[in-house]
Amino acid sequence: MQLNKQLAALPVYQPGRPLEEVGRELGLPLESLIKLASNENPLGPSPKAIDAMSQIAKQVHLYPDGNAFYLRNAVAKKLGVTREQLIFGNGSNEIIEFVAHALLAPGTNIVVSQYCFAIYPIVAHLAGADCITVPAKNYGHDLLAMCEAITDQTRIVFVANPNNPTGTLAAEEAVLNLIDNSPEHTLLVIDEAYFEFLDDPVDLLSLLDSHPNLLLMRTFSKIYGLAGLRIGYGIGNAEFVSALEKVRQPFNLNTMAQTAALAALSDNDHLEATRVNNAAGLKFFTEAFRELSIESVPSHANFILTKVGDGLNMFQKLENRGIITRPMAGYQLPEWIRISIGTPVENKRCLAALQDLH
């Protein structure tokens, strides 16, 4: 058996470790562990989503709605777009795969920032495409340099805004300039996984009609608290979205995910509680790190990147105390860890451990 030659150079994506696995390994009770590693919602899923899933559970012997009819209608109405502008994926991660399948081939390339989401270069290499990596600017995107890096062979530019794993936010003027100057042969993907955490987000939806090469991505995994169900969506030009539908596999969204997402979409109380908790947590860590002279990157997401010396060593020491964070060596940031915002109790416990170990 001969494997695809592109696989040889591909790294294996390393997700955060499950609490149960850490507990077994360290001999710690599950209730003593806190996970601040994967940018999940510390308040859990929407109560409305939990109730809706319990109601639909008896129907999981049936195949799911292949077109996500009710969810598609609800999202279209909430965003003020047409149904035809939406495509749903098994997490917004699958949307990344859709565009890679549709646009990339050997001889083409993508443009990304230095500290970009790990999946962008992975899908490019798997398609046999090249990856042009533009040096970061203050740990964030240098959008002007990224625009200048586009070649005749560039098929996709990926921009996560806010960025994962650094939490930086590109300025509105720079984003709009990139949109206006991206050539027609290049798809500009703006990954807005953390959009709902922003106080004053840039609304790019109004630009979709005039920029057919613009695709926005959002998810139910972060603020909506449905990471375990894997559901996200893309918003773009209807004609291009129609082409992406040819790549999407049948029944890629399970019934539980569709049902929970539909219910969560209308739970404004849960969204607001999450925003308040996140803002307080970011303020708590930011002020504490400043007082302790610990370097961190100003964050606009639901996590904070902080410099701790040996990131992997600090990750292991925290894990031994039942606190799971994310080491950043895989992102060329070996001295850093990423801490997801937790509940106030979890945040205080994490900070106390960092103070003790730093």
Image (cartoon, helix red, strand yellow):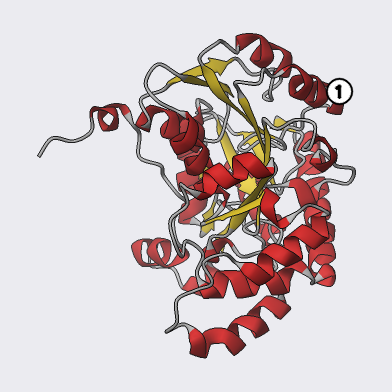
Q: Check the picture and name the quadrant holding the N terminus.
A: top left
Amino acid on which the number 1 mark rests in the picture? Glu
Q: Nearer the viewer, residue 171 or 238?
A: 238
Which residue in the rendered view is the most extreme toward the right?
200
287 relative to 212 in the view: left or right: right
Q: Is residue 70 above or below residue 168?
A: below
Q: Nearer the viewer, residue 276 or 343?
A: 276
Q: Is residue 309 visible?
A: yes
Which residue in the rendered view is the most extreme toward the left?
1
What count of labels does the image hold?
A: 1
Q: Check the picture and name the quadrant holding the C terminus.
A: top right
Q: Which residue is mark 1?
A: 173
The location of residue 168, given as percent across then percent down, is: 73, 32
The location of residue 144, given as percent across then percent down, is: 73, 13
* Residue at x 81% of width, y 54% of height: 79
Q: Choose top left, top right, bottom left or bottom right for residue 290.
A: top right
Q: Nearer the viewer, residue 164 or 35?
A: 164
* Residue at x 71% of width, y 74% of height: 263
* Residue at x 65% of width, y 35% of height: 306
205 relative to 3 in the view: left or right: right
The location of residue 77, given as percent across then percent down, is: 81, 61
Question: Within 10 Å of the Cα at label 1, are there few (<14), some (14-19), or many (20+) other Cα atoms?
Answer: few
The location of residue 219, given as percent across then percent down, is: 65, 54
- Secondary-structure class at tag 1: helix
* Residue at x 53% of width, y 65% of height: 228
Q: Is residue 345 visible?
A: no
133 relative to 280 in the view: left or right: left
Q: Choose top left, top right, bottom left or bottom right for residue 342.
A: bottom right
